[in-house]
Image (cartoon, rainbow, N blue to C red):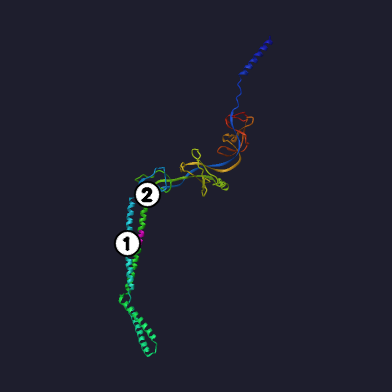
Amino acid sequence: MKKSYLILILLLLGGCAKEQAKQAPAPPPPPEVTVEAARREDVSVFDSYTSELKANEVAEVRARVEGTLLDYSFREGSLVQQGQVLFQLDPEPYQAALSAARGQLSQAEGRLAQAQGSLAQAKAELERARTQVNMQQVTAEVARSKSAWDAAQREVDRYQALVDQGAVPKQRYDQAVDTRDLARADYEAVRARLQNTKVGDQADVGVAKANVESAQAGVVSAQAAIKSARAEVEKAQLNLSYTTIRAPFTGIIGTLGVDPGSLVMPGQTRLATLSNSDPIYADFAISEAEYLRLSRNQGFDGSPFHLELADGSKYDEAGRFVLVDRSLNQGTGTITVRAKFSNPDLLLRPGGFGRVTMLKEKVPSAIVIPQKALTNIQSLDAVFVVKPDNTVEQRQIELGARLQDGIVVEKGLEPGERVVVDGLQKVRPGMAVQVL
């Protein structure tokens, strides 16, 4: 009987155990993760810097003459062309000044013509005074010519007697006659000049010379007055032209500094600001160490620059190196570098900010993984590696340069090894996983 009870108890215990076994929950499935294989590739490493955008030309438009602003001929914030009329000041005061200057020039030209006429008259008077001769000089010349004629006549008379005596040939007589006739002709010419000449005084010549010098001084003075009057005309024309204010270069014009009707002072009143932003400059600062490294290696103009805008978008146009500043900023230990970007659509505006990237180095055969695969072990960089049996190993790694689409692993990972990129929060070291 006892044996029967024992068998019954054992059967009941066995049934309960089977019922309990049927009710126990199944173990959870392995967590699902997404993996990517570490890849080997040649990579280009870029440095990135915060940059400020600056116009390549900036001008504050100011008046060069005083006047009332009548009107402006542009839309604020619009593109204006070089030479385009921007502002118009009241031209009437300057038109009147130009008319007055032209009148002064006309008067000066009249005075010059008068002075030149006086000079011509004075020169003629001097010439007449110089042609007058002294009476004593004329009388002496007449006496000389008369004496020569008388001497020649005496020679004729002497040779006449000798010819009559047969002492000399007649040819000698004829020569004496010719000499006498020439002397008589000279005498008659001198007498005729004496009759046609007014006897003057040396004092008349001195007065005539003084008159010429005075007239010449008058001409010089009139010429100087004309030069001054012409300068005044040119000045008045220039001032009148300044009442029309034009764009010094092509660019975007800003808001009005004054309203029409305002009195504008030369060089003081800012009418508007004009800037040329095509191309546009991007200025950024690099450390002294970076400057030395770049200068010694590839230089600044060996590769293009790229620009990331404030909204995170990439600017389409590549930039080019322009300059490195002349000195370092002693306060920050940095030096300014400037790149320029084509800006035909004027999307980029001065005063904006962006990030300029430039090539730092090229790394051949680098091991690259996605940045989202990174985790850490006590503040050290690590990844979860999925082994061939789909178990997880958390492995410490050493990182290199960060790339736009990944990060370089310097040590701790081999090409082809799989790292978890999605589902990191679900895995633990040694755990089996389901790879999607």
Among numbered discs 2 and 1, the one appearing first in the sequence: 1
Residue 111 pos. (x, y %): 32, 62
Residue 93 appears in the rendering: yes
* Element at label 1: helix
Q: Is residue 422 above or below residue 154?
A: above
Residue 63 pos. (x, y %): 38, 49
Residue 7 pos. (x, y %): 67, 12
Q: Residue at image x 35%, y 63%?
A: 221
* Magenta-tinted stretch: 223-228
Q: Which residue is mark 2?
A: 244
| Amino acid type, residue under disc 2 in the picture | Thr
Residue 128 pos. (x, y %): 32, 71
Q: Which residue is mark 1?
A: 111
Disc 2 vs disc 1: Cβ atoms closer than 8 Å? no
Q: Is residue 356 left or right of residue 100?
A: right
Q: Residue furthest top?
A: 1
* Element at label 2: strand
